[in-house]
Image: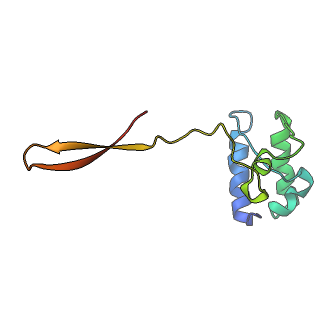
Amino acid sequence: MPFDVDGARLLYQVIAGSYERRSIIFTTNIEFSKWGTIFADDKLAASIIDRIVHHGRLIEFTGQSHRISQALMFGKPKPINTPRTPTPKTEKIPDENRNTNLTKNRCDS
């Protein structure tokens, strides 16, 4: 999704202000050669890339995406190791004041 010029300049200010002072993590699937189209300015994109790569570490992941391999729309099953939400259990607790039974919900961990 492309930035407008003001948004790109604002991001540049954040990056330049953090340069050699703070850590920033970027995740993207867009290669550096195409950042000029994203930031609406090739020179601004080059300045951003220059600050990122000067002290940065590039970690490139290859292969199939884990999300795609688990995607339900492609007929893949849900992962088995997902945390389960406790099932509410119902118990009847007598109401001594009114001579009726009320239902109280609780969750067992």
Coloring scheme used: rainbow
**Quadrant of residue 20 within the rendered picture:** top right
Q: Is residue 83 above or below residue 11?
A: above
Viewer-proximal residue among 72 and 49: 72
The quadrant the N terminus occupies is bottom right
Q: Is residue 90 rendered to the left or right of residue 95?
A: right
Q: Is residue 66 rendered to the left or right of residue 81?
A: right
> Image point 92% across, 54% down: which residue?
33
* Residue 9 position within the rendered picture, expressed as x and y whole percent measured from the top left: 72, 57
Q: Is residue 40 above or below residue 44?
A: below
The quadrant the C terminus occupies is top left
Viewer-proximal residue among 27 and 109: 109
**Quadrant of residue 74 within the rendered picture:** bottom right
- The number of discs equals 0
As drawn, the residue found furthest toward the left would be 97
> Image point 70% across, 53% down: which residue?
11
* Residue 21 position within the rendered picture, expressed as x and y whole percent measured from the top left: 69, 33
Viewer-proximal residue among 23 and 82: 82
* Residue 57 position within the rendered picture, expressed as x and y whole percent measured from the top left: 83, 34
As drawn, the residue found furthest toward the bottom would be 4
Q: Is residue 8 above or below residue 91?
A: below
> Image point 45% across, 43% down: which residue?
87
* Residue 104 position within the rendered picture, expressed as x and y whole percent measured from the top left: 27, 45
Q: Is residue 87 rendered to the left or right of residue 93?
A: right
> Image point 86% across, 44% down: which residue?
50
